[in-house]
């Protein structure tokens, strides 16, 4: 019995481990309220703010444009990994 228990526990631990470390990304669609390329910040009309990493080379978004944002929560900030205009 013992010889079967250890492999079963190890298998279960290895099967669950990747899910614990995977970052959950979320997609949000909204209207741009303001965009700052210098501050790497995008704010939607509903007040949701996203931080773009400093090497992000994006279109200069204008107020009123509808965008789709792929992001994940990192600490207290919402880090956008991709942003594009939706028509």
Image (cartoon, rainbow, N blue to C red):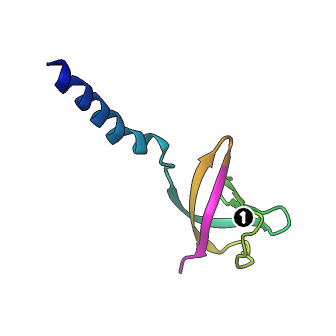
Residue 47 belongs to the span the image colors magenta: no
Q: Image point 59% across, 75% down: which residue? A: 84
Task: State the image quarter where residue 82 is shown.
Answer: bottom right
Q: Is residue 53 above or below residue 3?
A: below
- Nearest the viewer among 14 and 30 is 14
Which portion, as a residue range, is magenta?
78-87
Task: State the image quarter where residue 29 is shown.
Answer: bottom right
Tally of marks:
1
Q: Position of residue 5 (x, y in %)?
A: 21, 23
Q: Position of residue 67 (x, y in %)?
A: 59, 71
Q: Image point 72% across, 64% down: which residue? A: 33
Quadrant in which the N terminus is drawn? top left
Q: Image point 75% across, 69% down: which residue? A: 55
- Nearest the viewer among 22 and 29 is 22
In the displayed image of the protein, which residue is found farthest to the top? Answer: 2
Residue 82 belongs to the span the image colors magenta: yes
Q: Which residue is mark 1?
A: 33
Q: Position of residue 62 (x, y in %)?
A: 73, 75
Q: Position of residue 21 (x, y in %)?
A: 49, 43
């Amino acid at each position: 019995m013992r010889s079967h228990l250890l492999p079963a526990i190890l298998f279960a631990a290895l099967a669950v481990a990747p899910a614990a470390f995977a970052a959950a990304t979320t997609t949000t669609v909204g209207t741009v309220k303001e965009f700052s390329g210098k501050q790497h910040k995008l704010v939607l009309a509903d007040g949701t703010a996203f931080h773009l990493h400093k090497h992000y080379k994006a279109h200069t978004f204008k107020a009123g444009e509808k965008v789709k944002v792929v992001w994940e929560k990192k600490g207290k900030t919402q880090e956008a990994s991709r942003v594009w205009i939706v028509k």
